[in-house]
Image: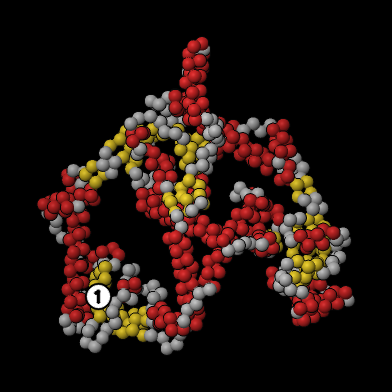
Amino acid sequence: MLQSIRDRLVGWVAWGIVILIGVPFAIIGITDFGTPERTIIVAEVGDISIEQREYQRRYQLRRQDVQQQLGADYNPRIFDPQLQHQTVNILIEEALLRRLAEDHNIHVSDDELALTIQSDPSFQKAGQFDFNEYRSRIGQQGFTPARYEQFLRQERILTILPRMIRASNFTTRTEAKRLNDLSVHKRDISYIVINRDFFPDDITISEDSARAYYDFHKDEFQRPDQVKLEYLRVSASQLTDRAELTDNNLRRHYEENSDRYIVDEQRKASHILIALPEGESLESSANILEKFNIVKDKLSAGEDFEELAHQYSDDPSSASAGGDLGQVALGMMVKPFETALFTMSKPGEISDPVRTSFGYHFIRLDEIIEREEKSFDEVRQELTQSYAEQEAIELFYDVSEHMAELSYESQDSLLPVSEALGIPLQTTDWVSRENKGLGIESSPDVLREAFSERLRAGGNSEPIEVDRNDAVIIRVTDYREATVLPFNDVKEQAISSAKAAAIDTKVHELAHELTEKVRNGNSFEELAKQHDLALESPGPTGRDDLSLPAGMLSEVFKMPAPTGNIVSIAAIPLSDGKYGVVSLNGIMLPETANELLVQELSQRYAASEAQSVVTAMRETATVVVHEDNL
């Protein structure tokens, strides 16, 4: 069809179209024409813009975490809006903290960054930093070393600033003691639990009662609006078998990615660190100078390097291993250390003292690991998988683009697209906005588009990404509006719900009846016996006691203390329609303060202070959130 249009674009028709297109360009210019991607802003913090791309990345990560935690209980309609606003608020706070860091010239030094990377367990093998592991790990996340270091600097700033704010905070002893008393005091209680099965299940609910319940609770019997969909789905994982795994293609892939299969020269090394604060000298610190000279003299005398490292090194991570640093590649260590190590030529050689920002190092070269290049045959299997995955991704973009073009040209059906591309046309049953299916119906983006006015009016969607390199095009084949189901269709459900409500009312009434009787002087123990209810007396109960029925503990610590003849008793709604009746018999305060808890509570105060600083910054900053772009 497109070709037939092109064939007709000749003569005066073509010139007319050129003029129509050219006049607007002449007036407004062509600055933005051909721009590959438009930057969409979700929020502005002063002159700092938060891009939709970063927001979406962070939002999807948070969403995946919550979905994994909740599983089938995840409800997109409830949680997605919350996560969207949480994510944009986190990004706004991070922008405020970065601005605060810039204003106060707070930065992360190269040495601190190197130490952070080298001490990360995920970059280590056998307890030692491994450069190849580091490069591989960050590569899997789409980072180059330079980009990762930039990302890590920003992350470190976001942890350093709150820590600095917390360090300036303190709690008075009186405040700490009061907080300690509130946190660790115990309560002596007695309680009974009234279950729903306390009342017989033979309660009779008439049809009129069930209808009355139905009329008053119609939202319980409403079927939401629903759609049926048909869709085409294409993903890179489905296309790996289409890759042409010829010898020539694999060899070209090997040459293009040769750096993956080359291991640069590395050196195994050990060191003894004599720590010296930056800006100080040996001459200004007698103790450090003495230690430095002892190590230097003992090494000159040929004493065992490992034993000296155990005894004198100020690097705790390597001292316990006799100073062993494992394999070291260029770029892993600070420059003076690296220069000295790679200048040495013979294993067993010990360097002269090397000064870095950490102090003085005595470095021993343990082994030289020559540069290694893996042959094509050695990595053929890895190449085959890598090439197939790479080709599948390229095919995915080609096929999905072609699918989008054909879908645009065939707005009244997806069948021609399916036949042209050999992609099966799939369908769904009725789907609601809160669908919890396992297929595309669980994608919030699919559901959002499925219930849009545009799709309900007919036509195909744009490609919708449901996962990485996985996209669908959908169309609505049927729609039914939300409606309250007729009473006769839900009669049994209405009877069951009305019966449950009647039992809940009885449980509620008995709990409050017993509570009032105890307040009026009746014995709690005698009342429990009269109703054949078990009276539990767990003794002193703390805030961390998990033995109480769910929902009771927090309410117990809200009850007022008993005074004189005034009894402290409460009816507490619990889970599953249960009720607890709780008597607070006494409160026990600790005789002495728990120092560890006092310290923890002080830290909580400090953390709250740090959050207050961020909140105050936000109140004074100009913050604009573009809700439509979330």
Q: Nearer the viewer, residue 516 or 63?
A: 63
Judge whether residue 299 can be spotted in this image: yes
Q: Position of residue 547 (x, y in %)?
A: 37, 74
**As drawn, is 86 to the left or to the right of 295?**
left
**Which residue is outermost to the front?**
27
- The residue carrying pointer 1 sits among few (fewer than 14), some (14 to 19) or many (20 or more) residues within 10 Å by Cα, namely many
Q: Residue at x 41, y 40 (%)?
A: 446
Q: Residue at image x 42%, y 88%?
A: 591
Q: Identify the image quadrant of residue 380.
A: top right
548 or 62: which is nearer to us? Answer: 62
Q: Position of residue 242 (x, y in %)?
A: 59, 32
Counting labels gives 1
User: Residue 387, position in %: x, y?
Assistant: 65, 38
- Report whether 365 appears left or right of 255: right
Provide residue 453's location: percent of width, then percent of height. 33, 36
The amino acid type, in three-letter code, at marker 1 is Ala
Residue 438 visible to an observer of this rendering: no
Q: Is residue 427 above or below residue 285?
A: above
Query: Which residue has dot 1 on it?
Result: 570
568 to 463, vertically: above or below: below
Element carrying mark 1: strand
| 501, 324: nearer the viewer | 324
Does residue 424 appear to the left or right of 35 in the view shown?
Answer: left
Q: Is residue 522 above or below residue 39?
A: below
